[in-house]
Amino acid sequence: MRRAIKKSSLLKILFILLTLILVKTVNAESQLERITVATVPTSDLRGFERRYTHWLGYEVRERGRVSTALAKSWGAPKSAGRRYVLMSSAGSPDVFLRAVQAPRVKGYEAMTTWGWNAIEIIVDDPLALHEKFNRSPFKVIGEPKGLNSYPSIVAFQIVGPDKEVIYLTAETGDRDKSPLPLPNSHVDRIFIMVVAGPDIEALLDWYATKFQMPRGPSRQVPIGVVQAAQNLTAEDLVSIGLIRLKEHGNLIELNGYSSAHAGPRPFHSGHLPPGVGITSFSVPDLDALELLYIRPPAYYDGKVYDGRRAATVRGPVGELIELIENKR
């Protein structure tokens, strides 16, 4: 079982590469343009800021309190007045990690429920980072490994004290020929968000249809971090699919978590769900989307919104998807 689990990250990377090759043509009408924010609820905002400043080299871009209107737009009215911190890398200062103060959810474990389950970040030197993170408050849950048929692609996985899972991935070879985005700093921007549900095909169809996006095929592979989190055997495979956003290097990875081993995410009523609470994307026109928003689109201030309209919708498994118009 241990050998199969170690190979799982390699198979996952191979599947991503094959999908990137197969899905070459991006629909000009694709409505999800790029990932802009991943939001993580935390019971220790200062500790979160220290961890991401020291260990990932992220910089604070903004501090404040969640407005009543924004909290209601998320369907999380008890987030109103809660402090937040907005952070990003030096290389991609406009792609953010946002932490929002929230009570801890007892019993929640990463990668065991449906919804947003992981953040994938492009980095420059994963081996050096792995050595660093072995001494950090983050727990390494997947060791760095190169792909057998593409050994220059290396990734490892960590989980933070707030049960947020982060994949740290790099092209260590010829980056001009790589399907991965280029890092502009040692630890750079988010380029993939991972969402899970009980029916991979339904999940793929919903995102592809609602946002007019091309979808690749789904297949079953071993994913070691998921298998370990859910106490699966090496033979218990996980369904995986990809949706490619309009901007190069931005994707959504979709995982199928069997209802026998996973279920809906627990959360405190009125607050954001734990782990990864919201993923935010830029879109060209909120009015062009046939979606049932939690609240009507409205204008918001701050670095994330910059006076633009935004609205949030619940995805097919309850995941919060915030959409930010790229026009004022």
Image (tube, grey):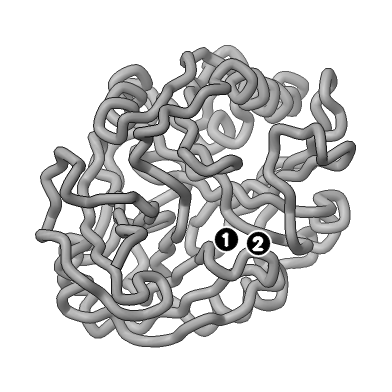
The amino acid marked with disc number 2 is: Phe
- Amino acid type indicated by mark 1: Gly
The residue singled out by tag 1 in the image is 160
Q: Residue at x 53, y 62 (%)?
A: 95
> Which element carries disc 1, helix, strand or loop?
loop
Q: Residues within 10 Å of mark 2 (few under 14, many from 20)?
A: many
Of pointers 1 and 2, the one earlier in the residue sequence: 2
Q: Position of residue 182 (x, y in %)?
A: 73, 49
Q: Which residue is nearer to you in this view: 226 or 181?
A: 181
Above/below status of 232 relative to 312: above
**Left or right of residue 141, residue 268 in this image:** left
Residue displayed at 86% across by 50% down: 127
Q: Is residue 218 left or right of residue 153?
A: left
> For residue 18, which numbered disc appears in the image?
none
Out of 100 and 205, give the one closest to the viewer: 205
Mark 1 to mark 2 CA distance (whole Å):
5 Å
Residue 280 in the image: state x and y as whole percent: 38, 55
Quadrant (top left/top right/bottom left/bottom right) for the N terminus: top right
Residue at image position (26%, 75%) is 300
- In the structure shown, which secondary structural element does the residue marked by tag 2 occupy? loop
Q: Which residue is painted at 53% across and 81% down in the image?
A: 61
Are the residues at dot 1 and dot 2 in contact (C-beta closer than 8 Å)?
A: yes
State which quarter of the image contains the C terminus: bottom left
The answer to whether 270 appears left or right of 151 in the picture is: left
Determine whether, in the image, residue 173 is placed left or right of residue 64. Answer: right
Q: Which residue is mark 2?
A: 138
- Quarter of the rendering containing residue 72: bottom left
Q: Report the number of numbered marks.
A: 2
